[in-house]
Amino acid sequence: MFVVEDSESYLYLIQNAFSGRQEEIRWELTVATDGEEAFRLLFEEEEKDVPLPDLILLDWNLSKMSGNEVLRRVKGRHKLRRIPVLVFSSSETDEDIYAAYGDCANGYITKPRDVDLLAAIVKSIKNSGLP
């Protein structure tokens, strides 16, 4: 899984939830902490013809390049567009949600503030049939 998150506290919660208490939700994570780094890493993986991530968990409000721009660029690349992208944002505005789906996000999840709720969301992502 490829995680794009610029908040240290949420990144910590995400990493703990994905490598946490329950063995069935352990995933290997690649992390980018801003939009430019995310696209650079994804572009390098695409160009090197190495296995691409099974899923991208994308923060919407990023530094250097917005989550919206990262999403548009990912979905505009032939190989990358096949990767499911879940937007993971603190924003609950209809404008952001519509923009994400308009740019082909596969889902939009509002960030929880509770680690147990985050773990439950992670487990539901894992059980949803996504890779």
Image (tube, helix red, strand yellow):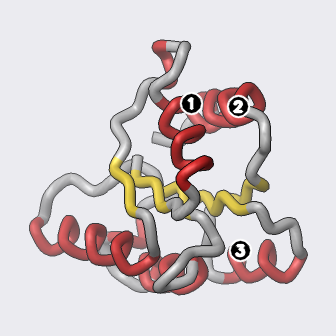
Could you tell whether 119 is left or right of 83 in the image?
right
SS state under label 1: helix
Could you tell whether 40 is left or right of 68 in the image?
left
Could you tell whether 32 is left or right of 113 in the image?
left
- Nearest the viewer among 86 and 22 is 22
Which mark lies nearer to you, 3 or 2? 2
State the image coordinates of residue 37 (x, y, percent, origin top left): 34, 73
Say above or below: 29 vs 91: above
Say which amino acid is labelled 3. Tyr
Location of residue 128 by image quarter: top right
Say above or below: 32 vs 75: above
Residue visible at 43% across and 60% down?
Answer: 83
State the image coordinates of residue 124 (x, y, percent, origin top left): 68, 32
Seen as rendered, the residue at the extreme left is 48
* Mark positioned earlier in the residue sequence (2 or 1): 1
Say which amino acid is labelled 1. Ala
Check if mark 3's residue and mark 2's residue have beta carbons within 8 Å: no
Could you tell whether 25 is left or right of 45 in the image?
right
* Mark positioned earlier in the residue sequence (3 or 1): 1
Count how many numbered circles sit on residues in the image: 3
Res 115 label: 2
Residue under pointer 3? 101
Residue under pointer 1? 17
